[in-house]
Amino acid sequence: MNDKTPLEILNNYFGYKGFQGKQEQIIKHILSGNNALVLMPTGGGKSICYQIPALMQGGVTIVISPLISLMQDQVANLKQLGINAEYIASNISYAEINNKLNLLTANAVKLLYITPERATSRIFINYIKSIKVNLFAIDEAHCISHWGYDFRPDYQQLKFLINEFPQIPRIALTATADHYTKVDIKHFLNLTDADFFTSSFLRENFIYRVSEKNNGKQQLLEFIKQHKHQSGIIYCKSRSRVDEITTFLQQNAINAMPYHAGLELSIREQHHRSFLQLNNSLMVATIAFGLGIDKPDVRFVYHFDMPRSIDHFYQEAGRAGRDGMVAESVINFGFKEVLDTCQFIMQSEQSELKKKYELVKLKQILTYCDTEQCRRQTLLELLGEASEVCGKCDNCLNPPVLYDATALVQKILSTIYHVGQKFNSGHIVDILRGKLSLNVQIWEHHKLSTFGLCNDVSSKELRRTIRQLFARNIINIEYASGKLKLTDKAIPIIRGISDMFLPQLNKKVKFVYDREIWLRTEFEERLYRKVLFWRHKIAIINNIPNYAVLSDKTIYELIKYKPLNQDELLDIYGIGKVKLKKYGTEILE
């Protein structure tokens, strides 16, 4: 055992002055030989919970992780901190694998990162019987669940590994896990008796906003021009959409890179590496990108298409602002995306129970998008946590203006009723606008009393109102067919007993955050540019991400406090004894 305390290890290696949340409690629990299930938000410091026990014990900690790129980044960062870490994956040669296994045999590795496929290999299981393993850490543990949104079959086979080594403690970690996912994690990892540690989902540094699609590409372009000096991720629902948006941005002189499973592996790796090493990089991606990504200076995540669930959204948005500095989360959405996602879920090969579950999750994210309340408060309530209003989201800064939509809503609901609740939104809109479509004529719906009653209302506004009624559970959608159905809440509105007030289309609210606004003098501006240049040079020389050298938060403190000796430098966030020895002289110069 290392005779240093967990706090001393934290100070010396990581340069942090204290633990966050329940980190220390979890570490002591693991060091006592106990199992744990840890639910901690992205950026909450999950990895510290197994890295410090690994440094304090003899033998090796085996970390099971889903992505090779994630393992590479974490190992590179740990080596910069002077920690003996390695990874074994399909992208390295047999000779390299043998070298790493020799290091393991010699007890010269503290953390070994492997994929679930390798962890369940009989050859690997037999090998680790010959070495001292002190802990199994299963990262991104939600992947173990059929209910999880990045399901990997080999994650469920980890039970064979656990059965072979029941005496070795294990810790499962994830950023989001609903009830069903937690049940699956406990079952497949035999963690039914494990202590459960959960942290608040609150991210104080986040600004949340939502915009309704209205020329979505132009909205995105305007947003990026406001954030031109920042790194960000733009999520799209499909590969073709990623290519389309990347091309559009490049045509507008925006340096954006695509990332999706349809690209060659070498291109994906190149784009991933560039994203990590550049100060103001933009990645346009499907959700194939970002699982566990450890770039702390991502300043925004922009969902060009609405996420599939509130859990998806929280996990993906959380990839921004991991350094604790101001970050922005944006969703740009329209009703068509909701209907398309409904159809996608219903046409999948999942069980009927799973489909219903996915639809509930979709309804939650629509509730978040259409809320008139504080975004952060709504988000946390949907995640099962109470919160005060944030005072800085779009709804807090620019509260939606409500208008009396009773008459319009009555016309929509009456039309749904008179057509027997057997038609989709497009057909309802055609009737209300007086459009003699083929279906309207076939079913003689041009004879209805509501035909043409909304010919002065645009199709877009009618669809928007239908979406708002759906979000408020006044109407439902039969997902297989798209038919609109009335709920009990519709009756008093149709009868004129209840009024209906809906929010007008929100005005544009600009949140322009520039990380350079804290530069107070011309001298600090020059100093900042020099530090950025030096950091980038060191990252390129060592083929590591920028943040592995210095994080943005560390640079902020360097410029603010201007340390003049090594003792003062040790007081800077992120500067421990290892980085002091490696970079201290150059930084002080």
Image (spheres, grey):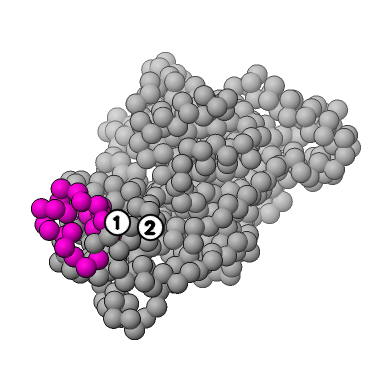
Please provide percent x and percent y for residue 157: 27, 43
Residue visible at 57% across and 39% down? 222
Structural distance between the alpha carbons of marks 2 and 1: 7 Å
Q: Quick one: label 1, few (<14), some, or many (20+) residues within 10 Å?
A: many
Question: SS class of the residue under badge 1?
Answer: loop
Who comes first in sequence, dot 2 or dot 1? 1
Q: Left or right: 4 with respect to 143?
A: right
Question: In terms of depth relative to the viewer, which is nearer, 218 or 200?
Answer: 218
Give the label on residue 407, or none: none
Seen in the picture, residue 568 relative to 102 is either above or below; the reply is below
Residue visible at 81% across and 41% down? 519
Q: Left or right: 485 with respect to 41?
A: left
Question: In terms of depth relative to the viewer, which is nearer, 503 or 3?
Answer: 503
Question: SS class of the residue under badge 2?
Answer: loop
Mark 1: amino acid: Arg
Q: Quadrant of residue 425?
A: bottom left
Q: Is residue 445 magenta?
A: yes
Please provide percent x and percent y for residue 96: 44, 18
Residue visible at 33% across and 57% down? 455
Residue receiving disc 1: 433
Mark 2: amino acid: Val
Q: Quick one: label 2, few (<14), some, or many (20+) residues within 10 Å?
A: some
Question: In terms of depth relative to the viewer, which is nearer, 158 or 5?
Answer: 158
Q: Are marks 2 and 1 in contact (CB under 8 Å)?
A: yes
Q: Is residue 375 magenta?
A: no
Span colored in magenta? 424-450
Residue visible at 29% across and 33% down? 121
Q: Quadrant of the C terminus?
A: top right
Q: Is residue 423 visible in the rendered structure shown here?
A: yes
Give the label on residue 457, or none: 2
